[in-house]
Image (cartoon, rainbow, N blue to C red):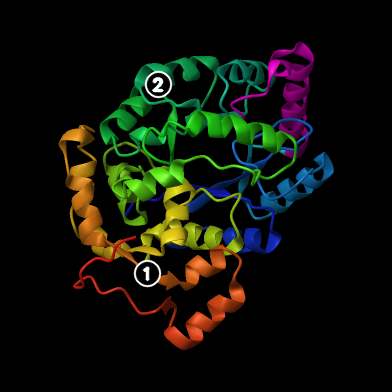
Amino acid sequence: MSHLDFSFPFNGDFETLDAQLAMNGVRDNKIREVYMNAPQEIEGSGRAGLIAHMSREELYRIVDRIHMAGVGVDLAMNSTCGGSEWYSQEHVDKVCDFIKEAHETHGLEAVTLANPFYIERVREACPTLEISVSVLADVDCVWRAQVFANAGATTICPDTAINRDLKTLAKIQRITGLQVKLMVNEGCLYKCPYRKFHMNYISHRSKEGEAEGSDFSFACGDLVSNDPAQLFRSNWVRPEELDLYVKAGAASYFKVVGRDMLKSKVLRSCNAYINQSYEGNLLDLLCSSTGFYSVEKSAYIDNKLLGSSGYFKRLSTCNRKCCDCTYCDELVHKYVRYGWVTEENLRDTGQDLLADTVIKRFGGIYPKCPDLSEKPREA
């Protein structure tokens, strides 16, 4: 059995954090770091997060608390857009000075950056700091990874588009010397056309200390609703598949998404991945478009049943010629069911009282446990 390293999200709730830290050592797996946003006055991030306008003092108290549990800290400063100010000497110096202070006086172990320009500057300022390339840098091949390695990065969270391309992941590690940190439960669409614009928007909102606005939304969810096969084209990785990456030399370090999620979602996902097993609705572990689809459509995929289908071998060797293939459509027909509202759905949307009622009356799933012998119901 392989011993795995994990990167867990901090969602701003200390009760959640303490429960996460208590998982360290489960199955001899290690929480290597907890990642979180930096103070908004310094830099934005690829997630708005749940803490608005955090001060440096508050940040350092959190860092110290995590360190007391024997776990490292990674500051996600992975904006994809900072406007023209981003490249001013004044702003570059401010960011580098802050990171150096956090590293040298508070033991900060790592930062996650998307911009190679900043990786170069931070490496000059902090020769011993771990610098992780963000998933938002869109590294999907060895050449791109080498550019970031040359800039001074030490670990890399590759573009989720290659999450199931074990050969390319192994090559990145072998040729560049970067350690792959694989993001496992992000549910963004495969090569989503809205992704870059969405992340630019979030980068600005996070810098402003604001959550995503509600005056409009990107159309990713509509793409899934119109084509549910996107559920399987999305490159999430099930908890039970992590050892396959280790055996292939593709990854042994895994990042769980959720710093903008409520306690129920964060703890469920962290627990499932560090235990490398989950009984229930696979979609209840996923974030972004596929996770939201589960809530909006009451969709259900039995995680264990899907695992027994052999789908991973097929999709991890896929040539991505989706226009000529119906395999993912077949997976939808066989494994996706609609109309079941789970306790997890309710808690993830803040409906704890209703969730308690569902547990009491229906055992956790309403109206009944999915029966895969039934004809699929339409979304």
On the image, the x and y values in percent for residue 197 come to 54, 29
Q: Which mark is residue 176?
A: 2
- Tell me the residue at 36%/37% (across/down): 190
- Tell me the residue at 63%/61% (across/down): 16
Residue type at the position of mark 1? Gly
| Residue farthest bottom in this picture | 361
Residue 254, relative to residue 267: is it above or below?
above
Q: Point out the image quarter for the N terminus.
A: bottom left
For the residue carrying disc 1, how many other residues have a C-alpha within 10 Å: few (<14), some (14-19), or many (20+)? Answer: some
On the image, the x and y values in percent for residue 11 come to 64, 52
- Give the structural element (helix, strand or loop) at label 2: helix
Magenta span covers which residues? Answer: 79-106
Residues under labels 1 and 2: Cα distance? 47 Å
Q: Point out the image quarter for the C terminus.
A: bottom left
Residue type at the position of mark 2? Thr
Left or right, 321 with reference to 231: left
Main secondary structure type of the part rendered in magenta: helix
On the image, the x and y values in percent for residue 313 come to 19, 46
Q: Which mark is residue 339?
A: 1
The one of 367 and 103 positioned closer to us in this rendering: 367
Whether residue 313 appears in this view of the structure is: no
The one of 248 and 263 positioned closer to us in this rendering: 263
The answer to whether the residue labelled 1 contacts the one labelled 2, judged by CB atoms less than 8 Å apart, is no
- Give the structural element (helix, strand or loop) at label 1: loop
- Tell me the residue at 55%/19% (across/down): 152
- Tell me the residue at 39%/40% (across/down): 189
The one of 365 and 313 positioned closer to us in this rendering: 365
On the image, the x and y values in percent for residue 365 come to 41, 76
Residue 26, relative to residue 101: is it above or below?
below
Would you say residue 339 sits in the magenta stretch?
A: no
The one of 346 and 23 positioned closer to us in this rendering: 346
